[in-house]
């Protein structure tokens, strides 16, 4: 044989197995034993599972130590975004240490694929993905999050999830945390 | 029939109907719960305590769903089919007794709607009419998947009805009567003083065949080929929605209830509890305990139905046919022969 063909023979069944009924009872015993096991269900809104630190959810816009928005409206994240869902309008910044700041900063969460490229592209570590994932809404408009919304996410999650800037991946990964719901 | 007899008959009919229809939601709930527990899940737990109101929510959902009738459907049959499936299952229960006759208002009242002397034949004849509903519904839907499901249901019915009939011949030979009450009465007492004189022990092969055929009769897994959602979308009820679908759904459970009660009567000693008459209960309490015993036995059979459903995978179509014709049919004939020989020998 030129091509490597591996013939897999189905295992021969013994007479006992071919009688079928004994195996049926074995199966019934197995399912019966499961009646008394602990269920693996997580009762979601009340119970929340622990997600790894690296899980990617809702974005946030970080603040610097003075409480100002860190973003400098360089548009790198919007350029990197494969889903084309970030739109930024910049304006001159009032502070001397940077030229620009975002006037509007909108992310269309319905288009976002939560790839995290924006976070990787950002030179200022200004945009980050949090672990929040339950932000359903009943209208499309509500799924577009603006600058204030993104900053609010930062204010909410900053205590439990410090900025990742400067952290190595392994440091981050060891930090398993729990974050609340956006609407909670 | 005098007026009182007429009133009693009506009241009995209503009680049986209400009992059956109110058992169905319980079965729906237990089906969900049991499947969940077997799969290490929790099951419905949001609607009412322990999800007990889930069937109610289902009903509301069914009521508000849109009724869809496919283009080119055979209108009359399409509408009639769900009814034709449910009604036989409810009707068949009429001939099944659930307890010894009781004395009420100075007369004897049988705990059974119709004490016909060919009770078993009646149950079989009416019960299997349900398959017509399935076949009609499947054909009237004008849908190829439905049609395939209907064909399977018909073929399955023909194959397993034979074994089902053969499986009880042994029981009938032992009893010598087609009246279900007589069959149950013949199972009172014990063998050797400790084994209940149930046909389960006297006719183990018949019991096995009957149980397996019952799964095929009720279109339950592992013989739910008429539905076979992985191959046939939803089989015979693919095109059904809203309450029409709900009727099919109820029919499946109604058939289960009827078959469980029949199985209890034929093989599990009906309402007979060995040794109960020695305890010395009053006649009323005695009747209550017997009826409760019947309900518990039938309940266990129902539980078994659901247990098997969530354990065994569906048979392939050819396996189903092979099993029916090449295994259970000869086995049934052999069982009849064996019973005959043993009966002759013991004379
Ligand atoms: S996570 Fe990906 S898709 Fe979403 S905004 Fe960032 S770059 Fe775009
Ligand atoms: S979030 Fe980062 S990459 Fe995006 S515009 Fe602001 S500074 Fe630039």
Image (cartoon, grey):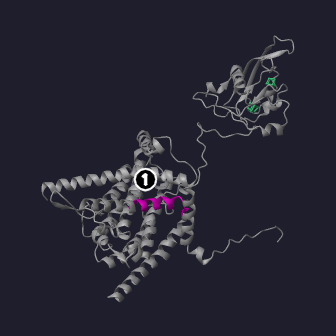
Quadrant position of the C terminus of chain A in the picture: top right
Seen from the viewer's position, the closer of residues A86 and A174 is A174
In the rendered image, residue B66, in percent from the top left (x then y), is placed at: 44, 40
Q: From where the camera sits, is residue B121 visible? A: no
User: Does residue A170 show up?
Assistant: yes
Depth check: give the residue in front, A123 or A40. Answer: A40
Is B212 drawn above or below residue B231 in the view shown? below
In the rendered view, would you say A56 is above or below B328?
A: above
Q: Residue at x 69, y 40 (%)?
A: A50
- The quarter holding residue A79 reads top right
- Give the main secondary structure, helix, strand or loop, of the magenta stretch: helix
Secondary structure under the numbered disc 1 in the rendered image:
helix
Name the quadrant containing residue B191: bottom left
Q: Is residue B191 left or right of residue A158?
A: left
Compare residues B257 and B39 and report the one nearer the observer: B39
Residue farthest along the left direction in this orientation: B2
For ligand 2, give the image quadrant.
top right
- The percent coordinates of residue B65 (x first, y second) are 44, 40
Q: Residue at x 59, y 51 (%)?
A: A38
Q: How many marks?
A: 1
The magenta-colored residue range is: B298-314
Up the image or down, B146 lies above or below A52; here it is below
Residue B39 image point, x, y percent: 57, 54
Which quadrant is the N terminus of chain A positioned in? bottom right
Dot 1: chain letter: B
Per the image, the residue denoted by label 1 is: B27
Q: Judge from the rendering whether residue B72 lies leftward or rightward of residue A121; answer left or right.
A: left
Confirm whether the magenta stretch covers residue B139: no
């Amino acid at each position: 044989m030129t091509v490597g063909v591996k013939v897999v023979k189905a295992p021969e069944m013994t007479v006992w197995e071919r009688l079928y009924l004994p195996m049926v009872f074995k199966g019934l015993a197995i399912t019966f034993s499961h009646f008394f096991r602990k269920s693996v269900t997580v009762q979601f809104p009340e119970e929340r599972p622990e997600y790894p630190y690296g899980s990617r959810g809702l974005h946030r816009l970080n603040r610097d130590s003075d409480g100002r928005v860190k973003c400098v409206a360089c548009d790198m994240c919007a350029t990197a975004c494969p889903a084309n869902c970030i739109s930024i309008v910049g304006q001159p910044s009032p502070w001397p240490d940077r030229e620009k700041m975002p006037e509007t900063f909108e992310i269309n969460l319905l288009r976002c694929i939560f790839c995290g490229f924006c976070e990787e592209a950002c030179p200022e570590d200004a945009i980050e993905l949090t672990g929040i994932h339950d932000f359903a809404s009943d209208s499309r408009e509500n799924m577009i999050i603006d600058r204030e919304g993104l900053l609010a996410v930062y204010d909410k999650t900053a205590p439990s999830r410090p900025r990742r800037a400067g952290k190595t991946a392994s440091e981050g990964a060891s930090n398993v945390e729990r974050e609340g719901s956006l609407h909670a | 029939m005098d007026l009182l007899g007429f009133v009693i008959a009506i009241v009995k009919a209503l009680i049986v109907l209400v009992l059956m229809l109110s058992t169905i939601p319980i079965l729906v709930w237990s089906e969900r719960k049991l499947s969940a527990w077997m799969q290490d899940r929790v099951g419905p737990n949001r609607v009412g305590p322990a999800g007990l109101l889930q069937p109610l929510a289902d009903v509301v959902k069914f009521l508000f769903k849109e009724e869809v009738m496919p283009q080119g459907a055979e209108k009359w049959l399409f509408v009639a089919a769900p009814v034709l499936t449910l009604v036989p299952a409810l009707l068949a229960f009429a001939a099944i007794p659930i307890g010894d006759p009781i004395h009420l208002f100075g007369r004897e009242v049988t705990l059974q709607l119709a004490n016909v002397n060919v009770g078993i034949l009646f149950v079989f004849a009416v019960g299997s009419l349900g398959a017509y509903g399935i076949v009609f519904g499947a054909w009237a839907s004008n849908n190829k998947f439905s049609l395939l499901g209907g064909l399977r249901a018909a073929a399955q019915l023909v194959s397993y009805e034979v074994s089902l009939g053969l499986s009880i011949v042994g029981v009938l030979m032992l009893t010598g009567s087609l009246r279900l009450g007589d069959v149950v009465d013949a199972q009172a007492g014990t063998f050797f003083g400790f084994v209940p004189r149930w046909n389960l022990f006297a006719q183990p092969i018949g019991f096995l065949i009957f149980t397996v055929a019952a799964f095929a009769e009720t279109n339950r897994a592992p013989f739910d080929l008429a539905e076979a959602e992985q191959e046939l979308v939803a089989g015979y009820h693919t095109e059904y929605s809203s309450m029409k679908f709900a009727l099919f759904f109820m029919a499946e459970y109604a058939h289960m209830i009827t078959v469980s009660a029949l199985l209890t009567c034929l093989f599990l000693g009906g309402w007979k509890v060995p040794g109960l008459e020695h305890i010395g209960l009053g006649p009323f309490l005695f009747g209550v305990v017997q009826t409760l015993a019947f309900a518990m036995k039938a309940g266990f059979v129902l539980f078994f139905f659901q247990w098997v459903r969530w354990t065994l995978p569906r048979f392939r179509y050819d396996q189903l046919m092979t099993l029916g014709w090449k295994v259970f049919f000869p086995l049934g004939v052999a069982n009849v022969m064996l019973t005959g020989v043993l009966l002759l020998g013991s004379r």
